Amino acid sequence: MTDQQPRDTPTATNSPPAVAPAAPSSPAPQAELIPAEDPEDTSDIDRYEIDSALGSDAASFMYPDSVTASILEYRTIQGRTYHSDRYASDYVMPNDEQQLQSVDITHHYLTMLLDNNLFLAPISPHVQRVLDVGTGSGIWAMQPEWVPPNVHFEIADATLTWPWKDNYFDFVHIRYLFGGVKDWPALFQEAYRCCAPGGWVQSCEADIHFYSDDGTTDSEPSLQTWADLYEKGGAQTGRTFFLQQEALQERSIAEAGFTDVRIFDYKLPVGGWTSDRKLFALGEYVRLTLENDLEGYTLYLWHNVLNWPREDYPQFLAAMRKAISNRKVHGYMMVRYVYARKP
């Protein structure tokens, strides 16, 4: 029997407020408002600084020799590369350099969100084996040009039976797989099987609707088109982009057998519209992530899944760039962290 704990409010200074989940039309009604005044004390955090902070290292990851040729036989669709048909061929995000830059910036802002911590789960400092599922470029497990002796990469389909033995890992870390998984309960059942007794699992997923506490997102229709794209695209592929609406993370984790389930929700601003210094910087990094590869986030769903009018796509991209740069639009996304222990 599982023991699901109440949602917690992070206590770190300047952390975004934690909130309970709600329907998209009325998200987080009891949450504190993010201050939306024009920033007065952020003159030293300009957009050039944000845009150039990561330098060229974001895309300097080198694949290990163990990656086989068949896996690297990527598909090319409208000039972008996607996973091989052998692995996750229905995954709608590209895997080329431009997308990996956005993935690495995402890691940067999520680390900022947690006050320079990589995770919330109270794992032991003497942890021996850690599994990162869906590791992206691997920037959070390795430096760009070298691999520590205690880190190695393995290729496996996380949506199938995992290739590791029972009770093997002390910590299973799963982050930003939304849109890539059909059967979330099965995923966490595998995490439970491979997690050692007393070990922890942590899941982080975003709800990529654009919310606002003051209704300003309504002034940019492209933000609703964005939501429609992911809602209808996820329904078509059978891979939802909105786990929070169905409580899929915490429900699947609890049903798998984990206990001490803890849930943390954060508001993540899009753009530098808030007067809070930390949230201003976070919002600018989120904006940069999107601006860097709006095409990569939307092209496959628009053209290959939903077959929406091709002539409307350039106008949509232009409208989205305008919307996420408009500081009069006080938009944010929701990010949910869930961690739990295997008894």
Image (cartoon, helix red, strand yellow):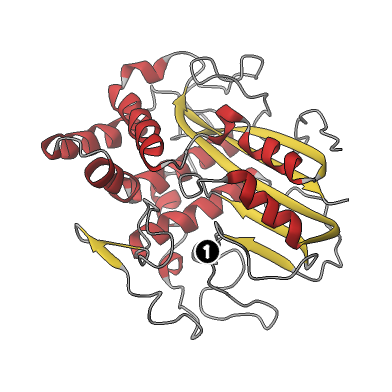
- The residue beneath circle 1 is 157
Nearer to us in this view, 320 or 136: 136
Q: Residue furthest left?
A: 311
Quarter of the rendering containing residue 74: bottom left
Say which quarter of the image contains residue 306: top left
In the rendered image, the vertical position of residue 112 relative to residue 210, given as above or below: below
Compared to residue 314, the image places residue 32 above or below, namely above
In the picture, the quarter occupied by the N terminus is: top right
- On the image, the x and y values in percent for residue 223 come to 34, 27
Query: Which residue is situated farthest in the bottom direction here?
Result: 65
Asked if one can make out residue 322 in the rendered structure from this viewpoint, the answer is yes
Residue 223 is left or right of residue 310, and the answer is right
Label 1 Cα crowd, 10 Å radius (few <14 / some 14-19 / many 20+): some
x, y percentage for residue 99?
A: 37, 57
> The residue tagged with tag 1: helix, strand or loop?
loop
Spot occupied by residue 320 in the image (x, y as percentages of width and height): 29, 34
**Up-down relation of residue 280 to residue 30 (above or below):** below
Residue type at the position of mark 1: Asp
- Residue 313 relative to residue 294: left or right: left
Q: Residue at x 85, y 63 (%)?
A: 125
Q: In the rendered view, tell whether residue 154 sits above or below residue 44.
A: below
User: Is residue 117 visible from the viewing direction of this image?
Assistant: no
Identify the residue at image location x=70%, y=41%.
Answer: 338
User: Residue 248 in the image: x percent, y percent?
Assistant: 62, 36
What is the tally of numbered marks visible in this picture?
1
Give whichever of 23, 110 is nearer the camera. Answer: 23
